[in-house]
Image (cartoon, helix red, strand yellow):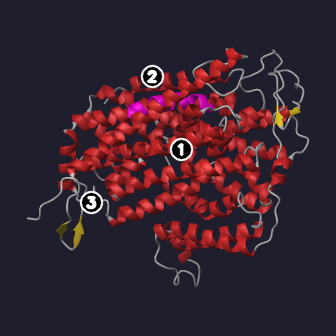
Amino acid sequence: MTPTSTVLQTPISIGAGVIASVGPAAFALLTWGAIALVLAGFGYIVWALLVDRSIRTERSNGR
Amino acid sequence: MVSTAVVLAVTIGTVVAFTAFGILAARGRVRSVDDFIAARDTAGRGTLTATVIASMMGAWILFSPAEAGAAFGGLPAILGYAIGSAIPLLLFVPIGLRIRSVMPSGHSLTEFAYGRFGAGMYLFILVISLFYMFIFLAAEMTGIAGALSLVAEIPQWQTALLVGGFVLVYTVYGGLVASIVTDTVQALVVLPLLAIGFAGAVLALGGTETIHAASIASDVHLLDPTFRPGLEFGIYVTFAIVGANMLNQGMWQRVYAADGERALRQGFGVAAIVVVPMLLVAGLFGVTAAALGLVGSGTASVSFFLVMEAAFPPWVTLLVVVLALLLVMSSADTMFNAIASVVTADLSRLLSDVDQRTLWIAGRGLTAVVGIGAIIVGAQGYSVLELFLTADLLAAAVFVPFLAGLYTERLGQTGAIGASLAGLAVGVLYFPLFRSPLAAIPGVGGAAPEPSFLVAFVGATAVSTAVTIVATVLGNADVDLERLDREIRSLEEPMADGGSEAEEPMADCGTEAEAPMADGDTGSDAFDPTTDGSDR
């Protein structure tokens, strides 16, 4: 049996074609990475809204 | 299944809450037709990021990526949706800056088409853009009506009427301002709901190891990044999404709504980054559903709902309903206002002495007409997929010569139309949905090549690009791009509600100051959805 990497399985031969799939570690990275990035996007929007608001407040107070 | 009455109550509560919020947030901020259709320079980077994401990510993300992942493409198909959605947003950074530079007082892509090329290209862009936006809107209405019918057996006409009706109310009242404000809040709810929902589902169903093992056992192609049908789908759906979104008036409006270069760069740039994991998460619902054997015949498109049903108790359905409602409301209000803005901006050009009140009535009236049409279509439950693909093909053939007009003065209308038609000819020849009518044409049917979505979309764009380059090199239209700035006027004359027209604002060192409102409120700088209109 050919040793396989846990990140990317080496190609396995099924029928007429050669098929490769992402390994379990890569799938986990894909899944949790995507979830984390979506939450990071949420965090960025909140931060940017607060920063922009405080800049506008400073400008208003400075007038 | 959660009771129909409860889901209906949650639906009504959600749409009423956002309608009230949209109306209150827009009060005092829509002082001219320009505000209604352009909301010029009002959106900071946070607001712009949120509204771009919300406008693009409609209820379709709960259906299409999951279906692609589960039924016909696996991982590469999902990546096609994700990357295809990010590319136009990235392109809008340089193109948006160019649009604002060439046409700073502009409102719409059709204005640009008319001013840059002429009536022929204008009509081309008008038809394709309106067709695509209306189909998008109809698909959204159909999608949400189908979703609530699936989870709670709510009659489709009731959903279409509720959702479409209430979105229409705040969009007719507050225009683009209301759309952007509500988009911002909707994005802030959608993002965590989507992420936490998927995280919870993965954990409840056994974790990534379990799902991965089940995927491999069920269908080795689900997670195969080299799976050819998935790759082909991923490539052509990328071209379809890019073309369509470059002609999406909702995106052009947001280019003008950005309160400066930094907001535009960061708004569209960050949105491009965020939509990738959003669509990956949405698509992985399909892989999960297929892996766990939840998908039956013809149910791949509702994989998201199947996974949530399998992972969570029935009451979580209510959160799914809220998620779906927010997604559809955010894109529906964008399309309502985008379609109305195209026609309103064109009316002001076609009718040279039109007064502000007429434009107001036209803008709001058109929004209502579009909305009613979308509600009627949404209630019927039509399949709009074929129309969607057709609109995408038209856009794929046209967007390159259209946008080339921003960068070169050598390309004339004949060259642009010629490039568009050449791309369209190739696209139509290979488009599988047109094979039957083509086959009926004597001499053409027998000679037509093997149909292929991939060749149709890639070919349409590639050929129109090649002809655009040739037409530009050989052309000598000698168009003056600076003329667009002079010819396209702002619609900045303020209107007091129910009163007479206020004075026309005076130009001041090249910028237009805003005339004060009848009640003395001098208006605001950039847009802050976290405050109301009164604390300026």
Q: Is residue B290 left or right of residue B467?
A: left
Indicate which disc residue B487 carries.
Answer: none
3D distance between C-alphas at marks 2 and 1: 38 Å
Foreground label between 2 and 3: 3
Range of magenta residues: B179-194
Q: Circle 3 sits in a helix, a strand or a loop, which is it?
A: loop
- Residue B483 visible in image: yes
Viewer-proximal residue, B485 or B442? B485
3D distance between C-alphas at marks 3 and 1: 32 Å
Quadrant of the rendered image containing residue B48? top right
Mark 2 highlights which residue? B9
Q: Earlier in the sequence, mark 2 or mark 1?
A: 2
3D distance between C-alphas at marks 2 and 3: 42 Å
Instruction: Tell me the amino acid under the disc marked 2.
Output: Ala
Mark 3 highlights which residue? B221
Mark 1 highlights which residue? B269
Q: Circle 2 sits in a helix, a strand or a loop, which is it?
A: helix
Q: Earlier in the sequence, mark 2 or mark 3?
A: 2
- Chain bearing tag 1 is B
Label 3 neighbour load within 10 Å: few <14, some 14-19, many 20+:
many
